[in-house]
Amino acid sequence: MSSVRRATVVVIGAGQAGLSAGYHLRRHGFASALAHPDAARSFVILDAETEPGGAWQHRWASLTMATVNHIFDLPGFRQGAVDRETPSREAVPEYFAAFEAQMGLPILRPVSVAAVRRADADPDGELLIESDAGIWRSRAVINATGTWRSPVLPEVPGADRFLGRQLHARDYVSLDEFAGRSVAVVGGGISAVQQLEEISRVARVAWYTRREPVFLDGDFSPEVEGRETIERVTADVEAGNPSRSVVSYTGLAWTPYARAARDRGALVRRPMFTAIEPHGVREADGSFTSVDTILWATGFRPSIAHLDPLGLRNERGGIEMRGTRVAAEPRVHLIGYGPSQSTVGANRAGRDAVAAIDRALTASDGASARPGSARDPERGDQTELLGASPRAGTFSGRPGAPTMEA
């Protein structure tokens, strides 16, 4: 077991939620488990990607900063001005990379986590995080793995006999590959509408959803609709209901791309087809539509299969939560999950998870304070354990030459 390493907290995933958790762990005085393996409290972030940026580095080329939903700042690090025509798969990873460098986060990549298990029957004992880079023992796990690696592909009779091309929205590159095609776009979410609009410029499209899409009139108000949505999602996860997409709670906005698809006559919803045949699909009314491509814009599910050894799911397939903490296993926190799927939600979840872990460790250790640690970061106290604490700044610049402005 000489290859086993220890960190008080292991964060899995380095997207927005994982980076937020790393920032707040630093603020709470947790040392780098890589630089200070013997520190009383330490942490490490394990990321499956080869580069910074999480899932953003895999977005399609035409998804620009003008098209994406608002990307909230990472904690303590403002975004500078970005050309709205810059692809999000360039701009967001650049920003994340600069944040990682500025905050000095202990990130190992690429590291794929295969399983998280209990080291023993002690409810306050350690967890084992098994990865392709060895085993880590920890007292808490913050899971921030998002959904990108778990695309949903519905089972439809005849799918295996289709002679055309099938792909998921995550595999979409650009509209050029669909020129002159007959495309069935399946899905009622934001990505489905975005990709439908693009493809309809160069191909014949048919749009299929299981439920009638709901488009909202007027502007979305984060203060009202956003708060109400979070309350509804929170109620679901606290009840242990299976996770749903955010758009299933909010509906769809009349964005410029939605209006463009509507005006082009492409935004005409059809009920979900009942079967797939070699050269097309069988419609709900029994008629046949010839297509040579099926784009499954059917969303994602949380990428948490590595947590299955812990038995967190209930009989409905959901995971009951209390804040960021899993009710059935308080040592595990899920962030970027349920009500924290948005970028602002991920930031807050990272903060909340770290605060909860800090309280639990302090209670478990029977101490109200610990040497060399930060006190409440909201009061601005600084940690001495790591030397310089995270410094607020602003990211500006282009790849290869990031600059920080205090």
Image (cartoon, rainbow, N blue to C red):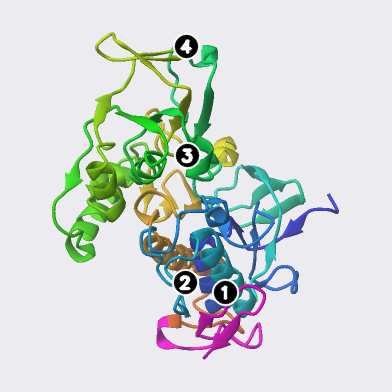
Q: Which of label 1 and label 3 is nearer to you?
A: 3
Q: Which of label 2 and label 4 is nearer to you?
A: 4
Give the SS element for disc 2: loop
Q: Which residue is mark 3?
A: 169
Q: Are marks 1 and 2 in contact (CB under 8 Å)?
A: yes
Residue 67 coordinates in the image, percent (x, y):
38, 58
Is residue 381 found inside the magenta-colored segment of the image? Answer: yes
Is residue 344 found inside the magenta-colored segment of the image? Answer: no
Give the main secondary structure of the magenta stretch: loop
Q: Which residue is mark 1?
A: 99
Dot 4: within a 10 Å radius of its alpha carbon, few (fewer than 14), some, or many (20 or more) residues? some
Give the Cα separation between the discs numbered 3 and 2. 26 Å
Q: Which of label 4 and label 1 is nearer to you?
A: 4
Give the Cα separation between the discs numbered 1 and 3. 28 Å
Tell me if I can see residue 338 in this picture.
yes
- Magenta range is 378-406
Q: Quarter-wise, where is residue 376 in the image?
A: bottom left
Q: Which residue is mark 4?
A: 158
Question: In the rendered view, would you say 371 is above or below 311?
Answer: below
Farthest residue to the top: give it.
286
At label 2, the amino acid type is Leu
Dot 2: within a 10 Å radius of its alpha carbon, few (fewer than 14), some, or many (20 or more) residues? many
At label 3, the amino acid type is Ala
Q: Which mark is residue 74?
A: 2
At label 4, the amino acid type is Gly
Q: Residue at x 65, y 83 (%)?
A: 385
Residue 310 coordinates in the image, percent (x, y):
56, 39
Left or right of 406: which side holds 240? left
Give the Cα separation between the discs numbered 4 and 1. 47 Å
